[in-house]
Amino acid sequence: SSTYFNSNLADILPLVSNHLNVMLFIDTAGSVVSARSAGYRAGKVTTFPEGLIAQVHLNNVLLKHPTADSSIKGIIALSEGAMLIASEPIMHSTGSGDINGTLIFGRFLDTDAVQHLAKTTLIGLSLKSVSSLEPTREPSDVMPVLTSDAPLQIRPKSDTEVDAYYLLNDVFGKPAFVVEAQMPRETYQRGVQTLQYYLLTLLGVGVVWGLVVAF
């Protein structure tokens, strides 16, 4: 309702306090009801990313919520940069009744965010979009063999370290980003599955979706 919106969501405080960059309300016709955007570090209103607005149409998977417990989450490549994104159906607070639209949260996975994760975990990290990769500059024996079926490649760097390359699909299921991580050999020796989970956790995938529950 307008009362709830004005009391809880009218300013950028929910964005800043939850370290979000965007919050988008869309009705069942696919029209934007409200679009909030902020630089949560500076606590200032910013221009809403046009790349995300361009995704708002009824044919987009982000707006397809057949049931109340539907949830769409992942990473998306926008013209403004990589963004962690979560899309949830708008329901009555009791969880009953009809779906009244879609609520989208987003947080940019920018250079500062990746560097912060690298410092926090003491593991070297970099994130590159697939479209920006230059085969002549990237490891020639790694990039050509990264696929959705085999997203992880490991290369020894020294006696104690390895380079890990992980291919990330976007929220639409298409290859979109490559994560490069320099890490101790023992991390890899824990197993491929553990390493895949670890890389995703380092990137913060899962943080935004938890905020949906908080709201």
Image (cartoon, rainbow, N blue to C red):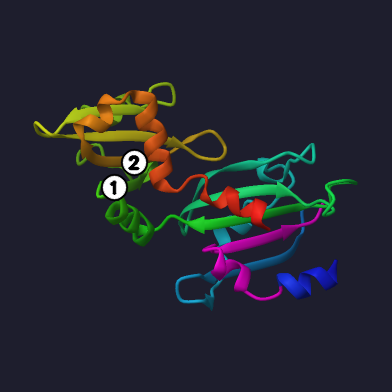
Judging by the rendered image, the residue that carries numbered circle 2 is: 179
Q: Earlier in the sequence, mark 1 or mark 2?
A: 1
Residue at x-position 38% and y-position 29%: 194
Element assignment for label 1: strand
Res 106 seen here:
yes
Which span of residues is magenta-colored?
10-28
Residue 66 x %, y %: 79, 37
Secondary structure under the numbered disc 2 in the rendered image? strand
Instruction: Tell me which residue sits at (54%, 62%) in the image.
Output: 20
Res. 155 image quadrant: top left
Q: Where is residue 132 in the image (x, y as percent from the top left)?
A: 34, 46
Residue 140 is at least partly visible in this image: no
Q: Do the residues labelled 1 and 2 touch (CB within 8 Å)?
A: yes
Q: Could you tell me the amino acid type at mark 1?
A: Leu
Q: Quadrant of the N terminus?
A: bottom right
Q: Is residue 51 left or right of residue 3?
A: left
Find the residue positioned furthest to the left.
159
Q: In which quarter of the image is residue 4?
A: bottom right
Give the CA separation, mark 1 to mark 2. Answer: 7 Å
Q: What residue type is labelled 2?
A: Val
Residue 82, percent from left and from top: 45, 52
Check the picture and name the quadrant holding the C terminus. bottom right
